[in-house]
Image: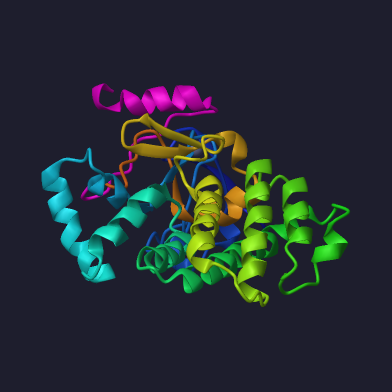
Amino acid sequence: MSDVRVLRCLECEEEHIEVDYSLLTKEQLAGREPLFEKYICERIARMYRVCSYALDTRVNAVKKEAHEGVRDQIIPSLKAEWGTEDFEVKLQRFVDLDLSFIGTPEEYYHLLREVVCSYVCGNFYPAQTAAGALGERILNRLILKTRDYFKSSSHYKKVYKKKSFDNWDLPIEVLQDWGVIDDKVAENFTSLKKYRNDSIHYNASYRFDENSIHAVKLLANIVEKQFSYTGRKDLFWVFNIPGEIWLRSEVENDPFVKEFVLPHTSYLTPYCEPMAKPPTKGRGVVGPLADDEFIDLRKNRKSN
Ligand SMILES: [Zn+2]
């Protein structure tokens, strides 16, 4: 027979937690084990805070206008990565590419960095080929991870069985219609497709030295526009709270966000300090709160 009791919630301090005592173990009844593995009070206002990043801002440190001291710190590591032969030429290619990012720690930044390294070192054929290959990898991963959210879409029957896509037109169109990528990213994919095909299909006098930069730039644009925190103001509150990035509550259920963003966030109250040493769990505030109210509480938390 069930024995449901209503307990006081330690987070909101109201009595709203229903527990069926007939289902508890002896250890739980004796207080030797907790009643819940993990309990989150739904009444407490929380938002998702970005907790991990892929970050590479080295290019800003080596531009002419950069502070000399900073430049001197970065140059040895670039020489170690690229080799010292024709170093100034390599450095100029790096500056011309001008890639600086802070984004989700998905695999793309790490792989893009290898493509950039090839290009900077003058390895134009592998740079262009890999830019196309990574573009295809991103396209595949976007569609395979989000398609099950769109089972009622007319496109679903065209894509649900496929394990991978090498003709880009269909996934570009589908992802654009689903709103997973915007028009600009779709355009960049379509332009990159040409360079991908040029690098793979035989063309006797093809100039990889001239074309590879366009392929690398298109790939970098795609990664930046799709996965960077600073480039996705439609998804994130970026530095409205100094040094912090939070997810806009209105996009919590967006398929792209669920698959590619939420794994890199923590669900927190305005008073939680997960980066503090040791981390602290602040008291909650009963919601719901609008994002700007939440952000105000967070910004003013020290005086609170
Ligand atoms: Zn509660």
Give me the residue at 38% from left, 24% from top. Answer: 297
Q: Position of residue 121 (x, y in %)?
A: 35, 68
Comparing 130 with 156, the one in front is 130
Left or right: 245 in relation to 176: left
Q: Quadrant of residue 183?
A: top right
Comparing 222 with 2, the one in front is 222
Residue 273 located within the stretch drawn in magenta: no
Left or right: 303 in relation to 172: left
Comparing 79 with 304, the one in front is 79
**Which quadrant is the N terminus positioned in?**
bottom right
Give me the residue at 85% from left, 64% from top. Answer: 158
Task: Please report the bounds of the magenta region as a residue range.
Answer: 276-304
Residue 296 located within the stretch drawn in magenta: yes
Asked if one can make out residue 178 in the rendered structure from this viewpoint, the answer is no
Left or right: 118 in relation to 287: left
Total numbered circles: 0
Q: Position of residue 220 (x, y in %)?
A: 49, 54
Give me the residue at 67% from left, 68% from top. Answer: 197
> 131 above or below 36?
below
Coloring basis for residues: rainbow
Asked if one can make out residue 182 in the rendered structure from this viewpoint, the answer is yes
- Outermost residue on the left side: it is 69
Q: Position of residue 221 (x, y in %)?
A: 52, 49
> 252 above or below 172?
above
> 115 above or below 52?
below
- Outermost residue on the front side: it is 205
Q: Position of residue 48 (x, y in %)?
A: 47, 42
